[in-house]
Amino acid sequence: MKPVRPSPLDLSVVTVTYNERDNIRLFIEEVNKVFQENHLHGEIIVVDDSSPDGTSDVVLELKKKYPSTRLIKRPGKMGISSAYRDGLAAAQGNVVTLLDADLSHSPAQIPELYAVTKEKKIGWGSRYLGDTKFETDFFHRCGTLLLNKWASFWLKTGMKDHTLGYFVIQREQLQQIMEYGQSKGIHPFDQILYGLPIAAIAKRLSIPIVEIKAPYNQRIHGETKIAFLWGVRVVFADLLYTLKLARRLRT
């Protein structure tokens, strides 16, 4: 008798943590609630950079209740970009998504975004559709709006929100995007706003993107890790990066 192979996972949810002990408990509970209510066979991959507050201990505790929760504990604070790469490399789902552990991305949108992938399209969360809730300070809102208008002009994606970073995509399509980017010297996860190059490359490869309302929530516990001056530097750096993207994707 041949061994029975486990059925492939519908969805892998990847999140990155550093000192998110209080938020990660809520995050894992909320995502699993979405899995259960929508009959999704999913997993959660938490990539933790050895948080000194014991975030990984909470993940291991919840793993007893939710066995599909997986922890990748790294030896130190190695950065969000490499953390996402490690999480995606470990993902076993046919479809993947990246969510902020502080619940600024609402897991409630997962089913609608996931449904889009059935048509070989990317489900993309947007804060700029209708009256979508966008909880942030004035300067963050202005910087984000400026960058998205700039990206729309230069990259011709037809999108309203390139920078939220909340999208659901078939794993094979993401691999295709990454390989094409590499051929052009574009490495999305070297960027904090990784959604910007992924959206631009998807457009270049004619992979359809469907934007769906996705509220942006203020974190419940802890403080944002994006300081004001650092945020300003990120915006101006990505204004220049957008020009670089446009140039490389034309060749």
Image: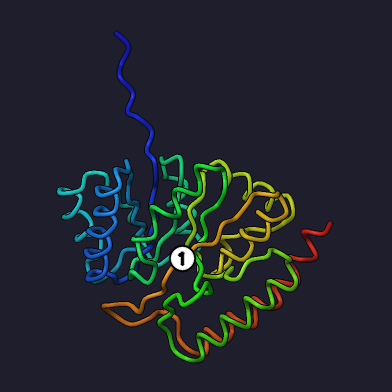
Q: What amino acid is labelled 1 in the image?
A: Ile
Q: Is residue 2 above or below residue 166?
A: above
213 with respect to 246 (left or right): left
**Kind of element beneath mark 1:** helix
The picture quadrant where one finds residue 26 is bottom left
Residue marked by disc 1: 80
128 with respect to 27 (left or right): right
Query: Which residue appears at 60% of the width and 71% of the height?
Result: 160
Q: Residue furthest top?
A: 1
Q: Which colour scheme is used?
A: rainbow
**Residue 218 picture location, percent across and down:** 35, 79
Please give the count of numbered marks on the rendered protein. Answer: 1
**Residue 12 picture location, percent across and down:** 39, 47
From the viewer's side, name the closer residue of 86 and 213.
213
Quadrant placement of the C terminus: bottom right
From the viewer's side, name the closer residue of 103 and 52.
103
How many C-alpha atoms fall within 10 Å of the one at disc 1: few (<14), some, or many (≥20)? many
From the viewer's side, name the closer residue of 165 and 91.
165
**Residue 226 picture location, percent across and down:** 45, 81
**Residue 249 picture location, percent across and down:** 77, 59
Query: Which residue appears at 25% of the width and 49% of the height?
Result: 37
Q: Which residue lies furthest to the right in this view?
A: 251
Query: Which residue appears at 37% of the width and 72% of the height?
Result: 104
The picture quadrant where one finds residue 194 is bottom right
Quadrant placement of the N terminus: top left
Q: Is residue 136 above or below residue 126?
A: below
